[in-house]
Image (tube, rainbow, N blue to C red):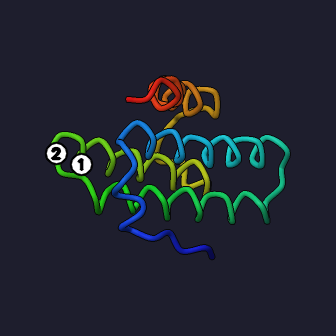
Amino acid sequence: MIMVDIEKWKQFSFAEQMANIGSEVSRVVVCKERGDQANLEKSTERALEILDMAIISSQSKNRLKELLRLRDILADYGFDLFNFVISGQELNNYFLPFAFLARSGY
């Protein structure tokens, strides 16, 4: 497992953090759609690892609540826990605005 440097992570804007998480989540979705269980597990763990960094560095109570719920949803999706009903497309759609924001410099 690749460890993320928390100090480097904190230098990213929230949009950049979420865009990075979204990039990894898109890998989770692709692996799940292909039935690639080994890479699905690795991608899910990686996405959760960087999401945990966002949770640790969160300064906003409202943002923290959303990140914690997102963590539950992502773990559920990647590990087939079946607590939430969400599609890969819905996950990708959630992260898309963050990618646009990060590219625009916010």
Q: Position of residue 88 (x, y in %)?
A: 64, 34
Compared with residue 79, is residue 34 higher up or lower down, i.e. above or below?
above
- The crowd level at tag 2 (other Cα within 10 Å; few <14, some 14-19, many 20+) is few
Q: CA distance from mark 2 to mark 1?
A: 6 Å
Q: Secondary structure at mark 2?
A: loop
Q: Position of residue 10 (x, y in %)?
A: 34, 57
Q: Position of residue 42 (x, y in %)?
A: 69, 65
* Number of numbered tags placed on the structure image: 2
Which residue is painted at 33% across and 47% down in the image?
A: 67
- The crowd level at tag 1 (other Cα within 10 Å; few <14, some 14-19, many 20+) is some
Q: Residue under circle 1?
A: 64
From the viewer's side, name the closer residue of 28 and 80.
Answer: 28
> Mark 2 touching mark 1, by CB under 8 A?
yes
Q: In the rendering, which numbered label is found on residue 101? A: none
From the viewer's side, name the closer residue of 90 and 53.
Answer: 53
Q: Amino acid at mark 2?
A: Ser
Q: Secondary structure at mark 1?
A: helix
Q: Position of residue 104 (x, y in %)?
A: 47, 23
Can you name the residue that lies furthest to the left here?
A: 61
Q: Is residue 61 left or right of residue 39?
A: left
Q: Amino acid at mark 1?
A: Leu
Q: Quadrant of residue 43?
A: bottom right
From the viewer's side, name the closer residue of 22 and 28.
Answer: 22
Compared with residue 84, is residue 37 higher up or lower down, i.e. above or below?
below
Q: Is residue 88 left or right of residue 38?
A: left
Q: Is residue 105 left or right of residue 88?
A: left
Compared with residue 75, is residue 34 higher up or lower down, i.e. above or below?
above
Q: Residue under circle 2?
A: 60
Which residue is painted at 17% across and 40% down in the image?
A: 62
Which residue is painted at 83% across and 50% down in the image?
A: 35
Quadrant where the N terminus is found in the figure? bottom right
Q: Is residue 43 left or right of residue 63?
A: right
